[in-house]
Image (spheres, rainbow, N blue to C red):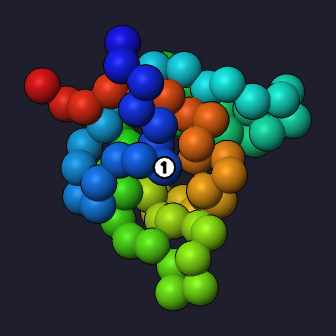
Amino acid sequence: MNDLSLKDSLINEEVYVDKIITDNDIKRRLLDIGLSRNTKVMPLFNSVSGGIRAYLIRNSIIAIRDIDAQNILVRRAA
């Protein structure tokens, strides 16, 4: 496993979740939207104001703050 965070992934790059390292409240919210181990995620675009990014997760577009995305470790698709 490399130390690539979701925040560091490139736009339109398929990545897969390896681990979520955050407090229980945020982790629970991320799990509720379907963000669990081996889930495919694709960053779509950054917000104009910065600090937030839209991701395609299980056929839904979800906005995640950069501060939370940096605690989601991912791996690139092979």
The mark total stands at 1
Which residue is at 38% across, 71% downward? 45
Which residue is at 44% across, 57% downward? 55
Q: Which kind of residue does numbered mark 1 sit on?
A: Lys
Q: Nearer the viewer, residue 13 or 67?
A: 67
Q: Is residue 56 left or right of residue 78?
A: right
> Is any part of residue 17 visible from this angle?
no
Q: Is the residue marked by circle 1 packed among few (<14), some (14-19), or many (20+) residues within 10 Å?
A: many
Q: Nearer the viewer, residue 3 or 37?
A: 3
> Is any part of residue 62 visible from this angle?
yes
In this view, 49 is above or below 2 = below
In this view, 45 is above or below 48 = above
Which residue is at 25% across, 31% downward? 76
Quadrant housing the N terminus: top left
Q: Is residue 7 left or right of residue 69?
A: left
Q: Nearer the viewer, residue 71 or 59?
A: 71
Q: Is residue 32 left or right of residue 54?
A: right
Residue at which label 1 appears: 7
> Where on the picture, by quarter, is residue 33?
top right
Image location (x, y in percent) of residue 50? 57, 76
In this view, 12 is above or below 50 = above
Which residue is at 25% across, 43% downward? 14
The kind of secondary structure element at disc 1 is helix
Image location (x, y in percent) of residue 42? 33, 51
| Residue at the bottom extreme, as displayed | 48
Q: Is residue 68 left or right of residue 2?
A: right
Quadrant housing the C terminus: top left
| Residue at the left extreme, as displayed | 78
Image location (x, y in percent) of residue 34? 56, 37
